[in-house]
């Protein structure tokens, strides 16, 4: 596997809900700061991509949904505090074990 950009070394996988009508995203992070996350999109809703076909996108942190933004029937909303962000960062091993 020959990537155009190298992923970050610490916690390279980001999982979060994004947008006005939150859609689940899984991203292999290549750049991250306090304003945005940039990386290979491995999952967008029900659509999954292999790393070789994954588009590179930039996500603004202010548009990452909180648990309160999720639909009322979402299990994640019931288990977590409504004001906290849905962003979780994990290692590559977790991506391999649990999938996208």
Image (cartoon, helix red, strand yellow):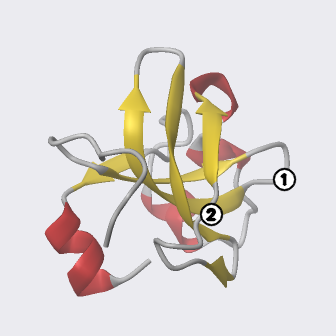
Residue at position x 51%, y 55% from top?
A: 40
Other-residue count near label 1 (Cα within 10 Å), few / some / many at <14 / 14–19 / ≥20: few
Residue at position x 31%, y 73% from top?
A: 1
Residue at position x 54%, y 24% from top?
A: 36
Image quadrant occupied by the C terminus: bottom left
Q: Say which of 30 and 52 sits in front.
A: 52
Identify whether 95 is placed above or below 39: below
In this view, which residue lies farthest toward the right? 20
Q: Is residue 92 left or right of residue 36?
A: left
Identify whether 79 is placed above or below 94: above
On residue 24, the disc is 2
Q: Mark 1 points at which residue?
A: 21
Residue at position x 30%, y 46% from top?
A: 6
Q: Is residue 74 left or right of residue 82?
A: right
C-alpha distance separating marks 1 and 2: 10 Å
The x and y percentages for residue 12 are: 27, 49
């Amino acid at each position: 596997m020959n990537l155009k950009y190298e992923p970050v070394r610490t916690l390279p996988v980001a999982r979060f809900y994004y947008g006005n009508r939150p859609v689940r995203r899984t991203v292999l992070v290549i750049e991250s700061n306090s304003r945005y996350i940039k990386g290979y999109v491995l999952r967008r809703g029900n659509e999954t991509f292999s790393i070789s076909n994954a588009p590179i996108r930039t996500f603004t942190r202010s548009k990452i949904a909180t648990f309160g933004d999720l639909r009322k029937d979402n299990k994640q909303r019931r288990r977590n505090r409504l004001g906290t962000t849905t962003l979780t960062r994990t290692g590559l091993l977790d991506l391999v074990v649990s999938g996208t």
